[in-house]
Amino acid sequence: MTFSEPLLSRHPWFTALLLGTMATPAAVIFAWLAPRPLDAVVALPLVLVDVWAAASGGATGTAETPSTEAPTLRLLLLVLGIVFTWVFYVIAARLLLWRLLRRAGDGVESG
């Protein structure tokens, strides 16, 4: 195995997976601690799933008919929101890496 090329240019998807995996826990913790408008900036998919679950009423039950399945469904929706946030950050990291590699490739002259 030769190390003549950096990991970034040889395996951009692997690098994006690493960056997305590192950014997701930080975003989820920051979104948990931040007030409502700011949490949507760092973990938009998680916030959207949470808002949808709260608005639908099925995941939380109502005051007249409390749902016994609410904690389980809410936990599943939380995990789904975290997975969506991870996918969001992986795609964002890959797009950023693609743009950086494209810009670096434009500066190198062949010949």
Image (tube, rainbow, N blue to C red):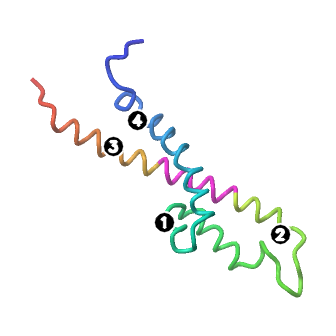
Q: Which residue is mark 3?
A: 98
User: Which residue is at the front of the view, 110 or 24?
Assistant: 24
How far apart in space, not on screen, are marks 3 and 4 (Cα)? 8 Å
- Camera-near label (1 vs 3) is 1
Q: Which residue is mark 4?
A: 12
Q: Residues within 10 Å of mark 3 (few under 14, many from 20)?
A: some
Q: Mark 1 or 2 closer to N-term?
A: 1
Q: Mark 3 or 4 closer to N-term?
A: 4
| Whether label 3 touches label 4, CB < 8 Å | yes
Q: Is residue 78 left or right of residue 61?
A: left
Judge whether 60 appears above or below 109 on screen. below
Q: Which amino acid, mark 2?
A: Ala
> Measuring 35% from the left and 25% from the top, which residue is drawn there?
6
Q: Which residues are magenta?
A: 79-90
Q: Which residue is mark 1?
A: 41
Mark 3, secondary structure of its residue: helix
Numbered badge on residue 49: none
